[in-house]
Amino acid sequence: MIEMPAGITAAEDAFDDTVWEILGQTYSLKQVSPDSMAWHANFPPGTFVPPHVHPTQDEFVYVLSGRYDLWLDGKEFVANAGDLVRMPKGLAHGIFNKSDADATSLFWVAPTRSLKELFERIHNVPDPAEVVRIAAEHEVDFLPPPA
């Protein structure tokens, strides 16, 4: 992985032209280094990331537009534009767009670990079960669905 170069990633651009389509969401890479990785995310209505755990990374979401319904450590929360969501490593969390409008945000993790490789592998993978299987190989552990 490269060390982080100085510079600006313009609003309409992705770092190294890297854009991933993951289960209906669009992630545009904005920055990557061994210490952190950031991406712009667009969650269309009805899309979500089911509850999961990053055992080795802290994760953050700065909400740019719309609303996210969140499940954090067994509790429900709502985050709106301007809010920052903090998800410490080891804390189970899920992110849902239950509204009728797109939700956009800036996500980042620290450290990066193998998250970029995970996104590369699950880009355009249509089967959620396969995404979950691959994620487990990259230190992202999805929780079993409720009974």
Image: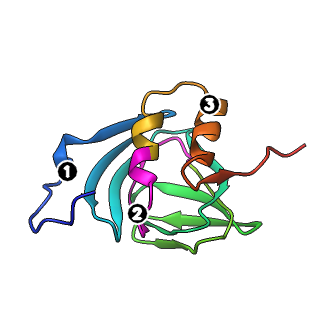
Can you identify the residue that label 2 sits on? Answer: 112
Residue displayed at 58% across by 36% down: 131
Can you identify the residue that label 1 sits on? Answer: 15
Instruction: Tell me which amino acid carries mark 1.
Output: Phe
Q: What's the magenta region?
A: 97-117
Determine the image quadrant of residue 33: bottom left
How many angstroms separate mark 2 from mark 1 (CA)? 15 Å
Q: Is residue 45 above or below residue 5?
A: above
Residue 98 visible (yes or no): no
Asked if residue 115 is among those painted magenta in the image, a careful observer would answer yes
Q: Residues within 10 Å of mark 2 (few under 14, many from 20)?
A: many
Q: Is residue 10 above or below residue 121?
A: below
Q: How is the image coloured?
A: rainbow
Discs 1, 3 touching: Cβ within 8 Å = no
How many angstroms separate mark 2 from mark 3 (CA)? 22 Å
Residue 136 visible (yes or no): yes
Instruction: Tell me which amino acid carries mark 3.
Output: Glu
* Residue positioned most to the left: 7
Determine the image quadrant of residue 4: bottom left
Residue 97, label in figure? none
Asked if residue 104 is among those painted magenta in the image, a careful observer would answer yes
Residue 130, label in figure? 3
Residue 70, horizontal then vertical, whole percent = 63, 60
Q: Residues within 10 Å of mark 1 (few under 14, many from 20)?
A: some
Residue displayed at 38% across by 50% down: 116
Residue displayed at 25% across by 56% down: 30
In the picture, measured across the screen, residue 84 lies left or right of residue 64, that is right
Q: Secondary structure at mark 2?
A: loop
Residue 7, horizontal then vertical, whole percent = 9, 65
Residue 35, horizontal then vertical, whole percent = 35, 71
N-terminal-most mark, 1 or 3: 1
Q: Secondary structure at mark 1?
A: helix
